[in-house]
Amino acid sequence: MPTAAVIGTVFMDCKGFAKQKYNPAGRNLGSVKFVHGGVGRNVAENLASLGIDTRFVASVDRSGIGREVTARLAKGNVDTSCIIETDTRGMGLWLAVMDDSGDLAGSVSQMPDLHHLENFISQSGADIVRQSGHIILELDLNQHITQKVLDLAREHRRPVYGIPGNLSVIMGNPAILADLDCFICNNVEAERLLGVPMPAGDTAALEWEMARFVAGKDLGSMVVTLGKSGCVYYDAKQGTAGHQPVFPVTVLDTSGAGDAFFSGTVMGLIRGLPLKDAVICGTKVASWTVQSDENTCRDLAAKAAADPIMMEIPAS
């Protein structure tokens, strides 16, 4: 039985890296490359690299690129048996420009056609959830997929770890958060959900607002990432809250950092760590990822195996 099932999307990303200060109205010299992306795809690859037995549930195009995505995941020890091929828009596209500091300067995205995945979940979702120990879910796929997976997870008593996409489903139905063991988002997303500013410098105020929100939504736990200021977390079951700073590194590309943080934190939770220790793992994985020009750290397994903190985590 797979330890975790990741249900989400695959994107092909076209990323431009500006060599000098980015001018949105002018021409910018730099480099351009295509990389595999998508929140679900990134998380699945990360979890497998961290030693979690991972199955990925998604759709890809029936094309050379789609087969390339699936082959890379399979080579990284991801169970790809639930990746379905489609003739049209099985994958999304993301056009992104990174400034000379590695931060996102602008982007445009095209979502995949989620009806392919919706039909697959309707037919096979019960078996997928029943056969998995933990569920990782992109919450904003669409209302039907989200609700169906959460209902099945509740029926089979499987913990669910949620990561947002565009907040469309969550904002329309915030009650779904009550079905999550842990919800992880960034400060911009948290501001929209909580309806209050989330200033990175006042972590005590952030922790208080999170505790109020978690209690009101009957959430298990919540983490809000703050970019260069680290993250804050609140665990309702343990009644603990805190702030975790970042590990200073030289940043090349921040895209994928949130997915990396989520992956490391969820890996820690799956292996039984308390949230305050799990977010350290998430911070580690994010710090390695922002040093890569891809959306994941290609040598993540080797870095984790050599890291003193990661080495002390019990096997799942």
Image (spheres, rainbow, N blue to C red):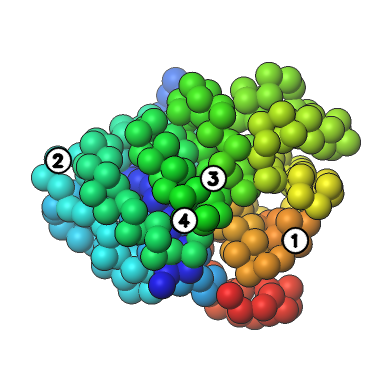
Q: Amino acid at mark 4?
A: His
Q: Nearer the viewer, residue 130 or 62?
A: 130
Residue at mark 4: 156
Q: Position of residue 225 (x, y in %)?
A: 68, 42
Element type where label 1 sits in the image: loop
Residue occupying the far left of the picture: 87
Task: Say the numbered circle drawn on residue 274.
Answer: 1
Q: Nearer the viewer, mark 3 or mark 4?
A: 4
Element type where label 3 sits in the image: strand
Element type where label 4 sits in the image: helix
Task: Say the numbered circle drawn on residue 162.
Answer: 3
Please report whichever mark, 3 or 2, sits nearer to the chain's N-terminal start.
2
Residue 122 located left or right of residue 77: left
Distance between the alpha carbons at the discs numbered 3 and 2: 27 Å
Element type where label 2 sits in the image: loop
272 above or below 228? Answer: below
Q: Position of residue 74 (x, y in %)?
A: 31, 70
35 above or below 46? Answer: above
Distance between the alpha carbons at the discs numbered 3 and 4: 17 Å
How many other residues sit within 10 Å of disc 3, few (<14), some (14-19) or many (≥20)?
many
Q: Quadrant of the C terminus?
A: bottom right
Q: Quadrant of residue 69?
A: bottom left
Distance between the alpha carbons at the discs numbered 1 and 4: 23 Å
Q: Amino acid at mark 3?
A: Gly
Please report whichever mark, 2 or 1, sits nearer to the chain's N-terminal start.
2
Asked whether the residues under the numbered discs 3 and 1 touch, taking CB atoms below 8 Å apart as contact, a structural biologist would say no
